[in-house]
């Protein structure tokens, strides 16, 4: 059969773009021998670079990778003790606050002036370093919102100032050289710690010797070293580091007084002490060598309470000034401490010789301060363990002050099976013998400010630029009621935010 295609039609067909190479020039394909794709249209083969490592027979293949640079942390970790220092930092001045014009300083004359009741007096600037040395300031007391530190003269402050005047060596009354013992109690925010600060300021103004325990909890929290005393039953324990720190604070705060008094007693246990040494040099031995801190403290206490010199040392003897002893957080000393005995039982706080010394000053029938002075032990409500024996003892003290006899049915008695610690109750038992120079243990309960004192306190906030409202009787009465009856801690909180509250109300 003849085909319908002619030669002319076949000649018109589109020729191929490139003739195929001869079979001898084409590459040999081994992976796909039956592949139908033209070799010219296939992707070109990639060139293989030199390998990182050359694998040999019976040799492991190791891949070398470039190490990345370590990423540096931009945040610097805090140094040792930096957080604690920041937490306990005390700021006593605020340059942004207004300066109160005509503000008087606390002085021997103003601390007994009843006309200044309800007025805020400034703390003397030369005494700020001494108050810092005894750790009289606390971080949460609000000193940083005013131009300079000041304190309000309430009724209790003026009465305490008059008590200092009577006990002081300059006084000529019947209370000259008397020993007054008080336990300061009250609700939270009533100013118990500030009351101790006011007492320290008055003592420095009257040239007294101030020995302060700023936080009783640190002595029983198990954070300092301790060692048993041989031959004691029950076993007593010393705290060299805590005693050394107390001596350092005492020397720093009372340097002017201690440097003018010389040693007047024999101290054979201290071989490095010279007979012509001052009390400052005596106390310095304790914080230079903590191992002998407790014998040094005993020697210093003997010198401060001496009324006459030892035989052969009368030449340079000078009368000793009165003393002020303060303790904040008394309840921590009425329970077991965090220390352990050799059989891993808890050590009672009264078995720590350092704590026992200060508690013995409260016991009746003793004359701990032979040259007169004041003992102020304050309770705490912010960090305070619940001790039933302490609460009962304070109630019994208040009942005796109110004239209630211990044999009266109204006299507080412990509950049955309450398990009251007898060592705690011995501190508050009535004195069997009375002394003309030693008064009974008293309890002083601080309350809120009166309305007049509240007005003066709020006017101080207004003069410092914290309150911009008109201070009238209605406004003061409102804030006095909101603060729970003039609680000074609540008044301070109201004074800080009263401007924001007023703005939001308008």
Image (cartoon, rainbow, N blue to C red):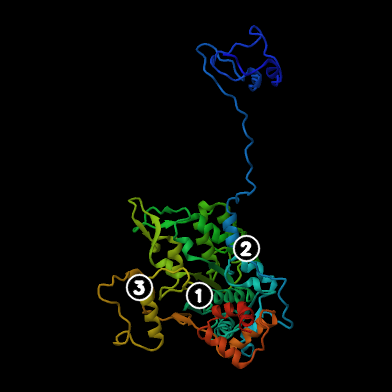
How crowded is the residue under tag 3: few (<14 C-alpha within 10 Å), some, or many (20+)? some
Q: Is residue 394 left or right of residue 49?
A: left
Residue 23: name its quadrant.
top right
How crowded is the residue under tag 2: few (<14 C-alpha within 10 Å), some, or many (20+)? some
From mark 1 to mark 2, how far is it between C-alphas? 21 Å
From mark 3 to mark 2, how far is it between C-alphas? 37 Å
Taking depth in this image into account, of 476 and 503 the one nearest to the observer is 503
Mark in front: 3 vs 1? 3
Local SS, label 3: helix
Residue 26 image point, x, y percent: 64, 11
Query: Which of the marked residues, 3 or 1, is nearer the chain's N terminus?
Result: 1
Taking depth in this image into account, of 360 and 487 the one nearest to the observer is 487
In the image, is residue 245 above or below residue 371?
Answer: above
Q: Which residue is mark 3?
A: 388
In the image, is residue 1 above or below residue 500?
Answer: above
Local SS, label 2: helix
């Amino acid at each position: 059969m003849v085909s319908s295609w002619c030669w002319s039609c076949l000649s018109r067909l589109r020729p191929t773009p490139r003739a195929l190479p001869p079979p001898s020039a084409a590459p040999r394909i081994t992976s796909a021998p039956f592949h139908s794709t033209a070799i010219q249209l296939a992707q070109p083969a990639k060139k293989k670079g030199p390998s990182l490592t050359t694998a040999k027979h019976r040799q492991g293949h190791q891949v070398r990778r470039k190490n990345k640079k370590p990423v540096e942390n931009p945040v610097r970790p805090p140094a040792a003790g930096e957080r604690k220092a920041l937490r306990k930092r005390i700021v006593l001045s605020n340059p942004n606050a207004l300066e109160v014009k005509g503000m008087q300083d606390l002085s021997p004359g103003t601390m007994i002036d009843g006309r200044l009741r309800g007025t805020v007096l400034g703390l003397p600037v030369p005494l700020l370093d001494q108050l810092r040395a005894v750790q009289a300031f606390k971080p949460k007391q609000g000193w940083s919102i005013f131009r300079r530190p000041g304190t309000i003269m309430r009724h209790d402050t003026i009465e305490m100032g008059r008590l200092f005047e009577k006990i002081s060596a300059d006084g000529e009354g019947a209370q000259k050289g008397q020993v007054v013992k008080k336990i300061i109690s009250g609700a939270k925010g009533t100013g118990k710690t500030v009351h101790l600060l006011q007492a320290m300021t008055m003592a420095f103004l009257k040239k007294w010797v101030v020995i302060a325990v700023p936080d009783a909890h640190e002595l029983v929290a198990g954070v300092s070293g301790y060692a048993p005393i041989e031959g004691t039953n029950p076993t007593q324990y010393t705290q060299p580091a805590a005693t050394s720190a107390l001596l350092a604070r005492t020397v720093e705060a009372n340097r002017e007084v201690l440097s003018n008094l010389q040693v007047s007693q024999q101290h054979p246990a201290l071989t490095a002490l010279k007979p012509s040494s001052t009390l400052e040099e005596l106390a310095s031995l304790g914080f230079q060598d903590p191992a002998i801190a407790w014998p040094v403290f005993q020697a210093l206490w003997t010198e401060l309470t001496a009324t006459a010199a030892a035989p052969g040392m009368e030449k340079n003897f000078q009368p000793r000034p009165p003393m002020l002893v303060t303790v904040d957080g008394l309840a921590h000393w009425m329970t077991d401490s965090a220390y352990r005995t050799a059989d891993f039982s808890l050590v009672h706080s009264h078995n720590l010789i350092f704590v026992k010394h200060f508690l013995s000053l409260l016991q009746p029938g003793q004359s701990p301060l032979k040259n007169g002075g004041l003992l102020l032990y304050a309770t705490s409500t912010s960090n305070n363990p619940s001790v039933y024996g302490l609460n009962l003892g304070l109630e019994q003290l208040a009942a005796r002050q109110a004239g209630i006899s211990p044999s009266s049915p109204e006299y507080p008695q412990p509950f049955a099976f309450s398990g009251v610690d007898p060592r705690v109750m011995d501190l508050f038992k009535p004195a069997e013998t009375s002394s003309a120079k030693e008064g009974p243990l008293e309890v002083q309960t601080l309350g809120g400010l009166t309305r007049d004192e509240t007005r003066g306190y709020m006017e101080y906030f207004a003069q410092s630029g914290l309150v911009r409202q008109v201070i009238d009787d209605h406004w003061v009465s409102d804030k006095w009621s909101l603060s729970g009856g003039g609680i000074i801690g609540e008044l301070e909180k109201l004074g800080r935010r009263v401007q924001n509250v007023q703005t939001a109300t308008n």
